[in-house]
Image (spheres, helix red, strand yellow):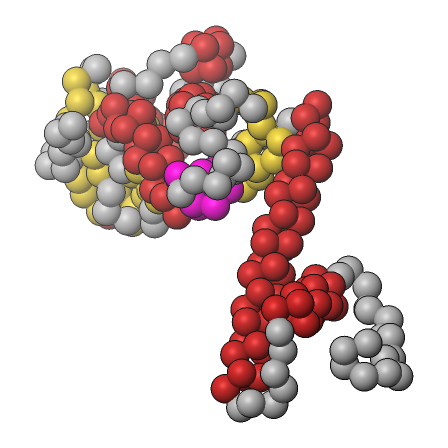
C-alpha cells in the first residue's frame, strides 16, 4: 500500500531564537506595568496585556523533537505533514502536533492454544520486534476501544496513550496471524514424511509468519522487523501421550539403524573370511555365525561368551 506520509514544509523557526523573543515579551509586559505612571495608565495596561497575550500564543508554538521521534502536524484537522528533524523548534502556534515514537518495540505474547494441521491441540506463542514506519497511517488508520476509552480521561491524546493503542492493535493482529499459520502446518513429522512442520522447519515458518503479520499491519503503517515462535509444545491434555509416541518412534528408528549396521558388519565379516580363505564354512555354520553376531551386535546388554572346548563341528 502506498504511503501517505509527507514531510512538513510549513514555517519552522529556531526554538532558541523564539525563546529569546518570548522573554522580551515577558519583560515588556513587566515594564509596562512597572512604569505605568510614566508612560500612561491606558498605554501601559494595553501594551502589557498585548505582551502577555503574545507571549502565551508564542509559548504554544515550541516543539522539541528527540531522536527516533516524529511529530504529526495538523492545522485545524488538516494533515500538514510529519516533522522528524531533531532539535528545538518553533512552529505556527495554531498547528497541533502529535508525538509518535519511532523506536523499535518488543511484543512478547502469552502462549495460546490452537489446533495444528492434523488437529492436535498445541500451545504456541511468538516474540516480535516492530516499529512505526508510516506516521500518517498509524495516526489516522487505527481506532479501537483503547483509544476511545483513553480519550475520555485525557490519556488517549498523549504519546503513551497512543502507543498503548498501537500495541493493542499489533497484539490482536499478531495473534490472529499466529493462529492462521499454526493451522497450516503440523506440529511434528510423525508419519515420516518430508513435510514442513512447526517443530523442524523453523526458518520456513518464521518467514511465513513474518509475511502474514506484515500484511495485517500494512494498513497501520507498522513495520515488522522480526517475528519468531518463542514457545511450542503440545497442550497439557495430550502432552504425555505424544511424548510416549515420540519415544516409541525414536526407539524404532534407533533399532532400525542398529539392525542395518549389524547386517552390514556380518556381511563384511563373511566376505573377508571367504576372500582371505581363513576358514571354510558350510551353510549351517554360516547361519550359526550370523545368528551369533546379530545377537552380539543387536543385544541391549553385553553378550556372555561361551567357550567351545571341542572341535568346530561339535
Look at the image and tell me in which quarter the N terminus lies: top left
Depth check, front residue: 47 or 241:
241
Total count of labels:
0
Q: Residue at x 62, y 31 (%)?
A: 234
Q: Is residue 138 above or below residue 130?
A: above
Residue 202 visible here: yes
Give the residue drawn at x 57%, y 37%.
232
Q: Position of residue 63 (x, y in %)?
A: 31, 38
Q: Nearer the viewer, residue 291 or 313?
A: 313
Q: Quadrant of residue 265?
A: bottom right
Identify whether 143 is placed above or below 64: above
Secondary structure mostly seen in the magenta stretch: loop
Question: Range of the magenta residues?
Answer: 195-202
**Residue name at image x 27 percent, y 37 percent:** 133
Q: Is residue 75 left or right of residue 239?
A: left
Q: Is the residue 84 above or below the residue 111 in the image?
A: below
Compared across the picture, whether 240 is left or right of 274 comes to right
| Image x and y of residue 191, in percent | 50, 36
What residue is at 49 percent from the left and 24 percent from the top?
A: 118
Is residue 100 visible in the rendered structure shown here? no
Residue 179 inside the magenta-drawn segment: no
Residue 198 in the magenta stretch? The answer is yes
Question: Camera-side residue: 235 or 217?
Answer: 235
- In the image, residue 187 above or below residue 157: below
**Which x, y percent locates residue 246?**
64, 41
Quarter of the image containing the C terminus? Answer: bottom right
* Res 157 quadrant in image: top left
Query: Left or right: 6 with respect to 110?
Result: left
> Which of these two is toward me, 107 or 184?
184
Amino acid at each position: 500500500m502506498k504511503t501517505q506520509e509527507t514531510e512538513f514544509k510549513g514555517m519552522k523557526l529556531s526554538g532558541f531564537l523564539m525563546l529569546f523573543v518570548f522573554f522580551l515579551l515577558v519583560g515588556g509586559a513587566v515594564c509596562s506595568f512597572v512604569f505605568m505612571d510614566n508612560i500612561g495608565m491606558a498605554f501601559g495596561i494595553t501594551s502589557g496585556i498585548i505582551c502577555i497575550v503574545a507571549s502565551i500564543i508564542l509559548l504554544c508554538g515550541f516543539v522539541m523533537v528527540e531522536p527516533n521521534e516524529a511529530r504529526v502536524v495538523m492545522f485545524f484537522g488538516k494533515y500538514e505533514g510529519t516533522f522528524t528533524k531533531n532539535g528545538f523548534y518553533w512552529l505556527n502556534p495554531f498547528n497541533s502536533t502529535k508525538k509518535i515514537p519511532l523506536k523499535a518495540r518488543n511484543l512478547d505474547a502469552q502462549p495460546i492454544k490452537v489446533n495444528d494441521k492434523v488437529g492436535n491441540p498445541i500451545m504456541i506463542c511468538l516474540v516480535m520486534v516492530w516499529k512505526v514506519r508510516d506516521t500518517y497511517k498509524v495516526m489516522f488508520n487505527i481506532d479501537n476501544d483503547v483509544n476511545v476509552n483513553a480519550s475520555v480521561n485525557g490519556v488517549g491524546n498523549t504519546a503513551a496513550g497512543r502507543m498503548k493503542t498501537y500495541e493493542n492493535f499489533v497484539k490482536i493482529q499478531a495473534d490472529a496471524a499466529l493462529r492462521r499459520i499454526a493451522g497450516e502446518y503440523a506440529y511434528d513429522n510423525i508419519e515420516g514424511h518430508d513435510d514442513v512442520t512447526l517443530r523442524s522447519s523453523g526458518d520456513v515458518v518464521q518467514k511465513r509468519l513474518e509475511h502474514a503479520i506484515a500484511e495485517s499491519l500494512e494498513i497501520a503503517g507498522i513495520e515488522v522487523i522480526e517475528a519468531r515462535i518463542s514457545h511450542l509444545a503440545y497442550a497439557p491434555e495430550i502432552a504425555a501421550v505424544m511424548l510416549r509416541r515420540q519415544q516409541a518412534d525414536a526407539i524404532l528408528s534407533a533399532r532400525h539403524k542398529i539392525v542395518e549396521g549389524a547386517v552390514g558388519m556380518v556381511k563384511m565379516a563373511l566376505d573377508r573370511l571367504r576372500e582371505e580363505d581363513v576358514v571354510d564354512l558350510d551353510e549351517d555354520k554360516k547361519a550359526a555365525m550370523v545368528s551369533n553376531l546379530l545377537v552380539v551386535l543387536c543385544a541391549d546388554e553385553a553378550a556372555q561368551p561361551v567357550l567351545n572346548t571341542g572341535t568346530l563341528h561339535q
